[in-house]
Image (cartoon, rainbow, N blue to C red):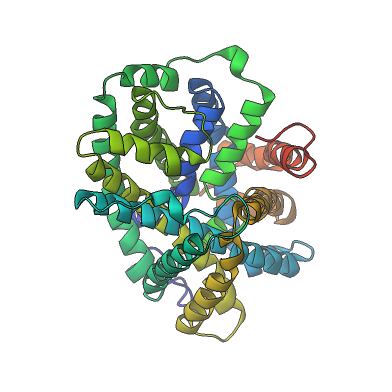
Amino acid sequence: MDNGTRETFTSKFAVLMTMIGVAVGLGNFWRFPYMVGKFGGATFVIFYILVNVLIGIPALMAEWALGRSTRQGTVGAFAHAGLPYGRSLGWFFFFVVLAATGYYSNAVGWVLYHAITELAAAFHISYHAAEILPPPTGFVAKSFVLQLSCTALVILCCAAVLLRGLRSGIEIISKITMPALLVILIILIVRALTLPGAGRGLEWYILKFDWSALTGKVMVAALGQTVFSLSLGGTFMVVYGSYLNRNDDLKTNAIWTTLGDSISGVLAGFAIIPAVFALGLEPGSGPGLIFFTLPQVFAAIPAGWLFGLLFFLGLFGAGLLSDIAAFEVLVAGITDNTRLSRTRAVWLLSAFVFLIAIPPMINMEIFVPWDLTFGSGMQTLGCLLAVITVAWVMKRSEALKELAKNEDSRFAIWLYYWLRFVIPGAILLVGIWWLLTEVFKVLGGV
């Protein structure tokens, strides 16, 4: 506990496993491989790693600093730091996370169903995994019922962890899931690289860097992936930052968290891209790479059901940790600002998330705009406001004290001005690009 009022992490290992668990989610296993396929292989990968270092680490430190200095979640942090209309903005992002948690829980439910179908294949029971996905248009009763069932199971799993709190719930599942996820990835990588023809995929993925392919669209896509993958957005990491101990080194934790997040995404690519090339499938198939293309890969290789089960179980674990983090944002918002107990807040929010998850289940015409609005767009805006709050609203001495143990260090001062001028400009670039491409359709979607 911090000053007897707020639960904090028990150890540095617990911090790292939990923070990496927040960052490593569907963004790494689902979004990163198809972004690599869509934006040029090695060119995208190398630039993405560069962006993680120059943008991701400082922005992550800023969000943690905001949470730790205020000891508040999203709702209270902006107001306590002195941002004008901070409480109203905090509640706004609370409802953004509420809406985002609904559709994200749906997606984790899809993964759960895919894992079930892979297990069924071991007993020669045939299910079409993609039948759980929302139809492109209209309404399909079977898909809707399957989504209702799987989403309910996902939400119950989250509730079971959240009811146990930070140390007995979130910490423990993070410390179990993340090492297990690493083992699963290594097994899948070994299998993928031993498939005939996998070498072509490996070469395309990490060796063929082409400067001419490094276009503005690729650079902005990489920046957007960094914000998405690290769970930046003035929400998740602000709340988890409020649980950090005062003597925790933000720089070291941010470096290890970003490294763990980047490695998991890159390893997921090693497990997926070579296998896709080996079977002559299309790596640029977009969001369907995981849910449509990969099941074909597993069906075509010996004991494919086993590797499919391992993959989707790993993906489920990663997605569940991020979903738990989203719920924790909501729970902290309620318990910090009302008299409701944690138990009542968890059950109340579970019911609300389940209800708000229903509209995106209907079809992709609802799900995709829901994702773009409450995920990509609002997440970027939240990150921008968090960085601005730390670099422009908080007192300079307080910000430097949070960002580095030695507030007079050259690194802290350099970082402070980097956050003040460079990071907001980069995030604004992503936001403007999102508006032009996804809202106004000026430049063509990414």
Q: Is residue 247 visible?
A: no
Taking 197 as reference, is 326 left or right? right
The answer to whether 241 appears left or right of 195 in the picture is right
Pick the front one: 300 or 77: 300
Q: Give the residue at x 50% y 35%.
A: 34
Q: Is residue 83 above or below residue 200?
A: below
Question: Which residue sits at x=61%, y=55%?
Answer: 367
Residue at 62% in and 50% down: 368
Q: Nearer the viewer, residue 213 or 383?
A: 213
In the image, 233 versus 308, the foreground residue is 308
Counting from the top left corner in percent of width and height, residue 25 is at: 45, 49
Residue 145 in view (yes/no): yes
In the rendered view of the protein, which quadrant contains the N terminus? bottom left
Give left or right: position of 12 versus 391: left
Residue 343 position within the rendered picture, expressed as x and y whole percent measured from the top left? 45, 82
Q: Quadrant of residue 238?
A: bottom right
Instruction: Give the percent coordinates (x, y) of residue 430.
Output: 69, 38
Locate residue 317, reporting x and y percent: 35, 54
